[in-house]
Image: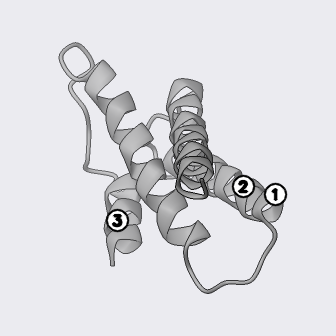
Amino acid sequence: MVIFGIFAIAFDPTHSVDKVFLTNFDKIKHILAFVVISYLFVESSIKLKIVLKIIILVLIALFIEYVQFMIGREASSLDFLASISGIGIFFLVRFFVLKDSSK
């Protein structure tokens, strides 16, 4: 349900961001969205190696930017990098939380 909502917003051609006021806030939303997507995907019952899950998450981030370009919204390499940052943040937190909880 959360993923559907994220994709609905990402692909909505009428959804726009005030370029002056919300540029950095938009990047924060990308980071938070991909922290959530990463958590849901990695913790799902889908049996894949972590490296393959990371590749799929990166491809999802790339796909979102591609679709935004195709529907007339602005595709942004900075949005893509923010999404990748969200994936990275999730895995860093996951690594350190699991490392600390195993002691």
Rendered position, 81 above or below 56: above
Name the side, left or right, on which 89 lies relative to 54.
left
Mark sitting earlier along the chain (3/1): 3
Q: CA–CA distance between discs 3 and 1? A: 27 Å
Q: Which residue is mark 1?
A: 51
Q: Which residue is mark 2?
A: 54
Q: Position of residue 9 (x, y in %)?
A: 31, 57
Q: Which residue is mark 3?
A: 8
Say how many tags the image has: 3
Rendered position, 52 above or below 95: below
Name the side, left or right, on which 35 lies relative to 51.
left
Mark 2: secondary structure: helix
Mark sitting earlier along the chain (2/3): 3
Q: CA–CA distance between discs 2 and 3? A: 22 Å
Q: Residue at x 53, y 56 (%)?
A: 101
Image quarter (top left, top right, bottom left or bottom right) of the N terminus: bottom left
Q: Nearer the viewer, mark 2 or mark 3?
A: 2
Front residue (pair 10, 52): 52
Amino acid found under the numbered disc labelled 3: Ala
Amino acid found under the numbered disc labelled 2: Ile
Q: Position of residue 43 (x, y in %)?
A: 55, 73
Front residue (pair 97, 43): 97
Mark 1: secondary structure: helix
Residue closest to the far front: 103
Q: In the figure, residue 81 lies in which quadrant? A: top right
Q: Are marks 2 and 1 in contact (CB under 8 Å)?
A: yes
Amino acid found under the numbered disc labelled 1: Val
Q: Position of residue 84 (x, y in %)?
A: 60, 38
Q: Are marks 2 and 3 in contact (CB under 8 Å)?
A: no
